[in-house]
Image: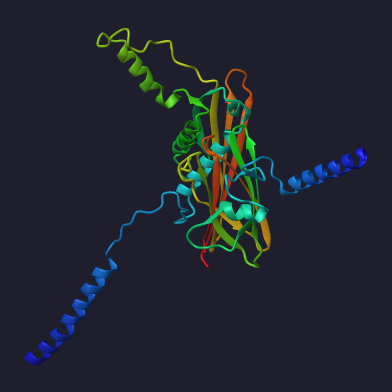
Amino acid sequence: MKTSVLVALLAACALAAGCAHKKGFEKEGFAYGCPIGDTKISSMEDLTKAKTVYEGKRTTIVDTEMRCTMTGDLIKVDTTLNNDSSKVKRINYKFRWIDREGMRAAEEEVWKPLMMYENSSQVITAVAPSNKAVDFRLVLQSQE
Amino acid sequence: MIDLSLSRSMVLLPLLAALVLAGGCASKPKTQYGDARSVETVTNQFGSTDLQMIAESMTRSMLQAPVIASGNLPIVTVQEVKNKTSEYIDTRSITDSIRVEVQKSGKVRFAVDAAAMQQQVEELQRQQSDLYDKEQAAQTGKMAGAQYRLEGNITSIVKQDKDIKDVFYKFNLQLWNIRNGLLEWSDEKEIRKTTSKS
């Protein structure tokens, strides 16, 4: 009897741990290492949608993956941009850093031009300008 | 005779009027404020976007260097960035931008650099004069020496034929430990710009 209860408990624990690992949620308010606050994020797609903003001319480039980590006390973001069209695409991007109160943690970044080959993906990395930045948005814009 | 001159002036007057109107429209300049942080591609010479991208990239990289990330507030002095390109680039403007961004991070203190030393010494000497309250005046011999020095260079490779011009810039920045001469951090930023006629 005791053994069967223990086995059931162990199985439940393993399942729960498996699920938690699958979602990649390390702690409350974070998904894939990225700060999410109260936003409901249940997949990588949810996360990239929540963190990406389009400004100016709309681009067909999409970010398919986003992961965050801390380097010292600064947020570091790795995001994968994907060009699934058969043409070379040129975009501008920047990160917008947000502080604890939801205000800009730093001055607006410079737009950075990026050329993407046809049917390619590229990883862009950004580090917060200071430890005041606790959240961010990736801003994308087409050059064409 | 009178009829001929009248008909000539009747043709010339509307032509002149049309020219004046057209000239007025074409030469009217238009001034607008723009986004100071937008991508500038007027020519492929070194421009504002290059300067801003270099400053941002170098700063973010430097903030991750162990000597700076440790939080010990190291004292840094900014030395020269050598311009090894064929065009005029105000490298002081690049290091000024880097200094501003790093200073804002609150992780570094900057000691007076060689370019500003003359003014610093003059001000100290002025405060030593009889005009100032001795107790409040800044004393000589109290300046903080830098622990690290920041220096670098910018180089370019330019290739051109009749239809295309390709410019490649490489900016290199290094943080040297003044006491032991060790290189504590260095990084590079590369930029390629191509202008084609077609």
Q: Which quadrant of the figure contains the N terminus of chain B?
A: bottom left
Q: Quadrant of residue A13?
A: top right
Instruction: Give the left or right position of residue A140, taking residue B89 as reference.
Output: right
Q: Quadrant of residue B19?
A: bottom left
Q: Position of residue A116 (x, y in %)?
A: 62, 58
Up the image or down, B154 lies above or below A55; here it is above
Q: Quadrant of residue B163?
A: bottom right
Instruction: Give the left or right position of residue B139, taking residue B69 as reference.
Output: left
Q: Residue at x 31, y 7 (%)?
A: B134
Q: Nearer the viewer, residue B191 or B102?
A: B102
Q: Residue at x 50, y 51 (%)?
A: A111
- Can I make out residue B124 in this image? yes
Task: Report the colour scheme.
Answer: rainbow
Q: Residue furthest front?
A: A1
Q: Residue at x 13, y 84 (%)?
A: B9
Q: Position of residue B58 (x, y in %)?
A: 55, 38
Instruction: Give the left or right position of residue B19, taking residue B195 as reference.
Output: left
Q: Residue furthest left?
A: B2
Q: Nearer the viewer, residue A138 or B149?
A: A138
Q: Residue at x 12, y 91 (%)?
A: B4
- Can I make out residue B158 in this image? no
Q: Position of residue B110 (x, y in %)?
A: 48, 25
Up the image or down, B177 lies above or below B165; here it is above
Q: Position of residue A3 (x, y in %)?
A: 92, 39
Q: Nearer the viewer, residue B90 or B109?
A: B109
Instruction: Give the left or right position of residue B192, taking residue B134 as reference.
Output: right
